[in-house]
Image: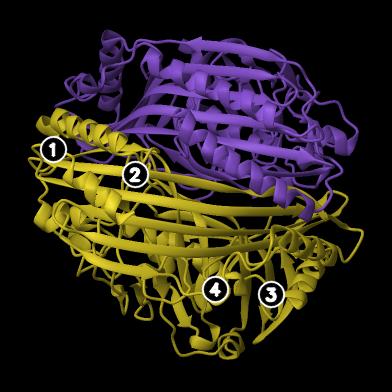
C-alpha cells in the first residue's frame, strides 16, 4: 500500500470515529475494530505460477452497547468516507433497533481504559511486477511449490471512551516446499518486512542441500515409541494447540481445557518448560478487542507450573479474575518457549537413534482432558542411527499426551530459538508468529 | 446490479482475451448463547468484486470491496498486469471458450419461511431456552446454543456473454453440553460441531424433535461420565451418518480433488495418494461404495446451479461400485490433468479466486436397515458425532474420534462407551465396507469450515450418507 493510500485510510477511520462520537447518545457506548489489507497473493506449483492476484479488502466491527445489551455489525470499510459513513450509519440505526430485543448480558465489558497507540512499520517489499521473477528465477530447475503473500496490513481500534490504536505494517511471507521425484519435500518459510534477494537465494541453496538427504531410499518404520527431535517448526505446531482449549481461563472454568490437570496441580510439566507471551518483537499489535494493552511480557508456564492463564476482561468479570489484556479467544498471540541447553551440533549425537522431525501436520486433540494430541509427521523427517541421518521416513501418525512429552519425557530444548511466522490467510493476512527452540523427547508414541 | 456490471465490462478497455467479474454480497447473522447468557449477537456484511483477466491463456486477478466503476476499472488493470507479469511463468495455457465458456442462468435456494421471519430477540430467546433444557444435572458445567443465518447473492458476468445469478439462503444450528465429574470431562453435541448446516429458511430453526433432542444431548453427556472406555481392539465398526460426513469428506473428497493430484495444494493442505492414472482403473473400496458429487439435492448445504467460473453443475458418480471414475476438478484442472471432473471451481467470497472444492459429496444408500446391520454383528462398536479428526497430507493415514459410542454384542446395542476413536488407512478402510444402510438410515449434514487453498479459504460443503458397517477396524479409547 502506498503511503498516500495508507494515510487516506487513517484519516477516513478517524473521521468515522469522530462522527460516531458526535452521533452517539449519552447512554450508548461503542467499540470499532478495523482490519484492512492490500495484498499480493501468488501461488506457485512446479516452479510455475498457478494463480496470481491482488486483494484490496477492509472491514470494521462496530459494537454498540447500552443498558447491558450489546450487538455488532461487521461492514465493509473502503477508505471512501461517503460510502463508509453511509454504511456505518445504517448499521448504527439497525443496532439501535435491535438492542432492546436482546437478553441482558451481565458480563458485558464497556470500554473503560484510556490507551492510545500508533505504530507504523514500513518495509521494502517486492514490487508487484517483481514478485514472480524474483521468486522463480532461483528455483527454475526445482519442483518448487509455494505461496507468496505480501503487502500492508492495518489493525486499528477506537471506542466511545476515547481509546484509539493504529497498527500498520508492511510484511511478506513466502511459504514453500521443494519436492524430489519420490515425493519427499523440504519445507521453508522466508518472511519479513524487507525482501533481501541474496538471503532468499541462500535459503534455497540450503534447501537444495537438505533435498540431497531426501534422495536416499525411504525407511518404513513400525508403530512404536521413538526418541524424537522436533525442529522448531514442529514445536510451534504443538505449542499452538494450547490456543485451542489450553491457556484460556474461560476454557479452564468451563471444563474445556487440556491444562485443567496442570491447573489443579494434579500433574506438572518438566521444569525445563517455560512459556510466556512476549510482545517485544512488535510483530503483532498489543491491543485487544477492548482496546486494552497486554503487558510486554506475561509468563504462562514457568518451570513446568501454570503461573498465569490468558484472561480477557469478560472472563475476568464473570469469574472474578484480573484481566491481563488477552484477546476475546484468550489465545496465544506472541508465544515464546524458552531455550534449553542442547547445542545445534549436539542435536544428532544427543538424539543418537530415533526420529528427526522437521514439521508436523493436521494436529487435533484426540482426548483433550488428558492432553492427548494426534497428528502426522510431514516433510523432511529422518531416521537417525548413532547420531547420523540414515534415511527419510514414510510419514507416521503420532498420538501422545503433553503430560508425557512436555513432562517426564522431555530431555531438553535447544539453546537457540527460531521465529516461526504465522502464514495463515483465512479472512485476511495474519501477523506474528512463535519464538520457539527445538526439542528432544524420549519415547514419543507413533501409532500408524 | 446487472446494469452496473454490464457497464463496467463495456468500460474496461484492455487488450485481453477474456474478462470476468464476480460480485458477491454476503449477509450473515450470528447468535450465540452460553449457559443461558448472550455471548455474541450481530450481523456481518461483505460486498466486493473479483475481476479475472485472461491474457494469452494466463489469468490474473484483482479483488476490491468497492463496486464503483473506477474501482472496478482499476482492479481490471491490476489483474491484467498480474497476468502479463506471470505470462512467462504460467503453468498451463487456458482458453476462454473451454475454461470460461459463456453461461446464462440462475439458481435460488429453496425455502419456506424467510430468514427475517424471526427477530434476533426471538432467536436469542430460543437459544436461552435450549441452554436451560440442556442442563439436566448439576454435573453439566457448560451449555451452548447457536444459530447462524446467511444470505449470499452472486453475480457473474463476462466479456463473452456470461450472466449467472445465484442466491443462497443458509441456516445452521448448534447446541451441546459439557459434563464433568472430577477429572472426567465429556462433551455431547447435536451431531458434532456445527454439523447442522443447510440451505433453506427459518423453518429449519426448530425441527419437530428439537426439545426431545436437546433433552437427550444433555442426558447423554451425563451418561458418558460413567461409561466404560471404548475398548482397544480390532472389531466391526458401525458409523452413524453424522460421522460418515467426516469420513467421506476427509478420505474420499480431499484425495479426489484434482488440484491436489496436480500438486497445487502440496505446500498447504497436501497432495493425494491418488494419481491421474488411477481414474477409471483404481478399485477405491468395496463394491458397495457409490459416491456422487451432487449439487442438485434440495436443501443440502453446497447445492448450486453453477460453479464460480460459470460451469453448469450436474450430478455425477465419482466412485461407482467401488471403482474410481471421476475427480473433483474444475474445467481448468480437467484440462491440465486430462481427467473427467465436475463443476467445482468455488471461492469462499469475492476476495478469493476459485479453486477445486467438494460441494455436496454423498454416499448413496444400500439395502440394509439399521436393525439388520446391528443384528448380524457378534461384536462391534457403534459411533456417532465427530469429536476429533486428523489425516495425513496424502489423505492416507487417518485417526478420527467420536463423542458417543455403544458396544454391539450378539446383535444388540448394549453398553455406552466413551472416548471412542478409530484409525486406519484410506484404501484398507473403504475396502472393509461391508454393509451400507438403506435410505431410511440416510441423513445429510454440512459444515461451513472446509479449509484449503493459498490464500486460505473456508468453504461450505454437504455430505449425505446412510449408516455403514466396516469390518475389522482398529478402535480404541482415551486416556493419557
Depth check, front residue: A217 or B244: B244
Can residue B385 be seen in the rendering of this structure?
Answer: yes
* Mark 3 chain: B
* Mark 1 chain: B
| Circle nearer the N terminus (2, 3) | 2
- Badges 2 and 4, same chain: yes
Q: Mark 1 points at which residue?
A: B13
Depth check, front residue: A75 or B50: A75
Q: Mark 2 points at which residue?
A: B49
What is the x, y in percent for residue B51?
26, 42
- Badges 1 and 2, same chain: yes
Left or right: B240, with A6 as reference point: right
Where is B304 relative to B6, above or below?
below
Chain letter for the part of the structure drawn in purple: A
Q: Which mark is residue B407?
A: 3
Left or right: A3, with B445 as reference point: left
Q: What is the C-alpha distance between the residues marked 3 and 4?
A: 18 Å
What is the x, y in percent for residue B102?
16, 61
* Mark 4 chain: B
Left or right: B339, with A259 as reference point: left
Q: Residue at x 54, y 83 (%)?
A: B441
Q: Assign a secondary structure to mark 4.
A: helix
Q: Assign a secondary structure to mark 2.
A: strand
| Circle nearer the N terminus (3, 4) | 4
Q: Residue at x 63, y 53 (%)?
A: B30
Q: Nearer the viewer, mark 1 or mark 2?
A: 1
Depth check, front residue: B53 or B181: B53
Crowding at dot 4, Cα within 10 Å, few <14 / some 14-19 / many 20+, comes out as many
- Badges 2 and 3, same chain: yes
Q: What is the C-alpha distance between the residues marked 2 and 4?
A: 37 Å
Amino acid at each position: 500500500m502506498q503511503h498516500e493510500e495508507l494515510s487516506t485510510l487513517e484519516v477516513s477511520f478517524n473521521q468515522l470515529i469522530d462522527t460516531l462520537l458526535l452521533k452517539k447518545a449519552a447512554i450508548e457506548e461503542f467499540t470499532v475494530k478495523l482490519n484492512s489489507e492490500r495484498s499480493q497473493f501468488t501461488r506457485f506449483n512446479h516452479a510455475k505460477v498457478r494463480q496470481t492476484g491482488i486483494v484490496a479488502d477492509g472491514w470494521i466491527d462496530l459494537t454498540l452497547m447500552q443498558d447491558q445489551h450489546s450487538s455488532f455489525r461487521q461492514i465493509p470499510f473502503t477508505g471512501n468516507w461517503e460510502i463508509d459513513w453511509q454504511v456505518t450509519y445504517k448499521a448504527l440505526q439497525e443496532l439501535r433497533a435491535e438492542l432492546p430485543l436482546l437478553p441482558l448480558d451481565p458480563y458485558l465489558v464497556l470500554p473503560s481504559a484510556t490507551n492510545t497507540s500508533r505504530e507504523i512499520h514500513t518495509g521494502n517489499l517486492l514490487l508487484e511486477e517483481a514478485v514472480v521473477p524474483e521468486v522463480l528465477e532461483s528455483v527454475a530447475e526445482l519442483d518448487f511449490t509455494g505461496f507468496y503473500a505480501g503487502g500492508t496490513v492495518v489493525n486499528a481500534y477506537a471506542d466511545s471512551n476515547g481509546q484509539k490504536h493504529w497498527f500498520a505494517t508492511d510484511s511478506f511471507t513466502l511459504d514453500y516446499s521443494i519436492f524430489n521425484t519420490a515425493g519427499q519435500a523440504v519445507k521453508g518459510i522466508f518472511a519479513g518486512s524487507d525482501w533481501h534477494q541474496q538471503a532468499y537465494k541462500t535459503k534455497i541453496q540450503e534447501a537444495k542441500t537438505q533435498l540431497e538427504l531426501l534422495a536416499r531410499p525411504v525407511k518404513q518404520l513400525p508403530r512404536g515409541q521413538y526418541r524424537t527431535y522436533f525442529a522448531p517448526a514442529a514445536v510451534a505446531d504443538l505449542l499452538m494447540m494450547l490456543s485451542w482449549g489450553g491457556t484460556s481461563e474461560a476454557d479452564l472454568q468451563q471444563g474445556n481445557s487440556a491444562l485443567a490437570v496442570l491447573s489443579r496441580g494434579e500433574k506438572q510439566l518438566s521444569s525445563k518448560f517455560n512459556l510466556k507471551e512476549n510482545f517485544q518483537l512488535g510483530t503483532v499489535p498489543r491491543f485487544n478487542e477492548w482496546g486494552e494493552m497486554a503487558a510486554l511480557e506475561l509468563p504462562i508456564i514457568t518451570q513446568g507450573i501454570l503461573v498465569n492463564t490468558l484472561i480477557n476482561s469478560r472472563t475476568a468479570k464473570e469469574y472474578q479474575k484480573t484481566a491481563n489484556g488477552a484477546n476475546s479467544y484468550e489465545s496465544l498471540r506472541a508465544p515464546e518457549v524458552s531455550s534449553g541447553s542442547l547445542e545445534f551440533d549436539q542435536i544428532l549425537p544427543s538424539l543418537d537413534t530415533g526420529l528427526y522431525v522437521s514439521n508436523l501436520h493436521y494436529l487435533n486433540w484426540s482426548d483433550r482432558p488428558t492432553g492427548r494430541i494426534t497428528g502426522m509427521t510431514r516433510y523432511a523427517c529422518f531416521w537417525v542411527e548413532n547420531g547420523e541421518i540414515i534415511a527419510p521416513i514414510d510419514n507416521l501418525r503420532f498420538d501422545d499426551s503433553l503430560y508425557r512429552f512436555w513432562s517426564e519425557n522431555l530431555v531438553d530444548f535447544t539453546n537457540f530459538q527460531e521465529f516461526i511466522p504465522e502464514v495463515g490467510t483465512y479472512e485476511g493476512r495474519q501477523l506474528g508468529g512463535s519464538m520457539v527452540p527445538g526439542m528432544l523427547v524420549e519415547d514419543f508414541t507413533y501409532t500408524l | 446490479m446487472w446494469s452496473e456490471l454490464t457497464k463496467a465490462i463495456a468500460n474496461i478497455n484492455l487488450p485481453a482475451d477474456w474478462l470476468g467479474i464476480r460480485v458477491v454480497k454476503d449477509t450473515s447473522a450470528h447468535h450465540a448463547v452460553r449457559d443461558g447468557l448472550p455471548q455474541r449477537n450481530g450481523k456481518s456484511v461483505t460486498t466486493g468484486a473479483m475481476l479475472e483477466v485472461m491474457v494469452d491463456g494466463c489469468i490474473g486477478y484483482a479483488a476490491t470491496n468497492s463496486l464503483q466503476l473506477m474501482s472496478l476499472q482499476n482492479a481490471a488493470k491490476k489483474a491484467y498486469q498480474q497476468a502479463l507479469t506471470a505470462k512467462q511463468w504460467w503453468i498451463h495455457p487456458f482458453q476462454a471458450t473451454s475454461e470460461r465458456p459463456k453461461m446464462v442462468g440462475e439458481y435460488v435456494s429453496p425455502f419456506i419461511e424467510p430468514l427475517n421471519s424471526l427477530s434476533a430477540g426471538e432467536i436469542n430467546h430460543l437459544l436461552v431456552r435450549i441452554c436451560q433444557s440442556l442442563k439436566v444435572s448439576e454435573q453439566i458445567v457448560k451449555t451452548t446454543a447457536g444459530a447462524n443465518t446467511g444470505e449470499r447473492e452472486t453475480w457473474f458476468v463476462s466479456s463473452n456473454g456470461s450472466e449467472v445469478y445465484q442466491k443462497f439462503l443458509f441456516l445452521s444450528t448448534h447446541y451441546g453440553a459439557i459434563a464433568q465429574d472430577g477429572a472426567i470431562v465429556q462433551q455431547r453435541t447435536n451431531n458434532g460441531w456445527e454439523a447442522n448446516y443447510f440451505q433453506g429458511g427459518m423453518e429449519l430453526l426448530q425441527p419437530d424433535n428439537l426439545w426431545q433432542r436437546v433433552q437427550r444431548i444433555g442426558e447423554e453427556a451425563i451418561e458418558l461420565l460413567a461409561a466404560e472406555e471404548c475398548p482397544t481392539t480390532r472389531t466391526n465398526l458401525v458409523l452413524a451418518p453424522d460421522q460418515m460426513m467426516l469420513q467421506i469428506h476427509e478420505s474420499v473428497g480431499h484425495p479426489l480433488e484434482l488440484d491436489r493430484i496436480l500438486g497445487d495444494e502440496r505446500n498447504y493442505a497436501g497432495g493425494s495418494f491418488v494419481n491421474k492414472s488411477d481414474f477409471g482403473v483404481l478399485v477405491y473400496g468395496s463394491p458397495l461404495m457409490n459416491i456422487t458429487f451432487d449439487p442438485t439435492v434440495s436443501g443440502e448445504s453446497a447445492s448450486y446451479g453453477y460453479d464460480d467460473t460459470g460451469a453448469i453443475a450436474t450430478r455425477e458418480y465419482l466412485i461407482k461400485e467401488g471403482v474410481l471414475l471421476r475427480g473433483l476438478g474444475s474445467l481448468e484442472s480437467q484440462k491440465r490433468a486430462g481427467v473427467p471432473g465436475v463443476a467445482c471451481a468455488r471461492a469462499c467470497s469475492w476476495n478469493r479466486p476459485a479453486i477445486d472444492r467438494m460441494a455436496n459429496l454423498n454416499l448413496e444408500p444400500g439395502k440394509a436397515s439399521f436393525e439388520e446391520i446391528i443384528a448380524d454383528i457378534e461384536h462391534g462398536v457403534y459411533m456417532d458425532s465427530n469429536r476429533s479428526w486428523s489425516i495425513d497430507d496424502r489423505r492416507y493415514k487417518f485417526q478420527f474420534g467420536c463423542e458417543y459410542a455403544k458396544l454391539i454384542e450378539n446383535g444388540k446395542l448394549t453398553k455406552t462407551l466413551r472416548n471412542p476413536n478409530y484409525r486406519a488407512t484410506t484404501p484398507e478402510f473403504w475396502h472393509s465396507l461391508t454393509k451400507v444402510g438403506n435410505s431410511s438410515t440416510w441423513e445429510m449434514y454440512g459444515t461451513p469450515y472446509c479449509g484449503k487453498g493459498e490464500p486460505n479459504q473456508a468453504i461450505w460443503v454437504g455430505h449425505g450418507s446412510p449408516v455403514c458397517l466396516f469390518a475389522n477396524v482398529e478402535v480404541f479409547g482415551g486416556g493419557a
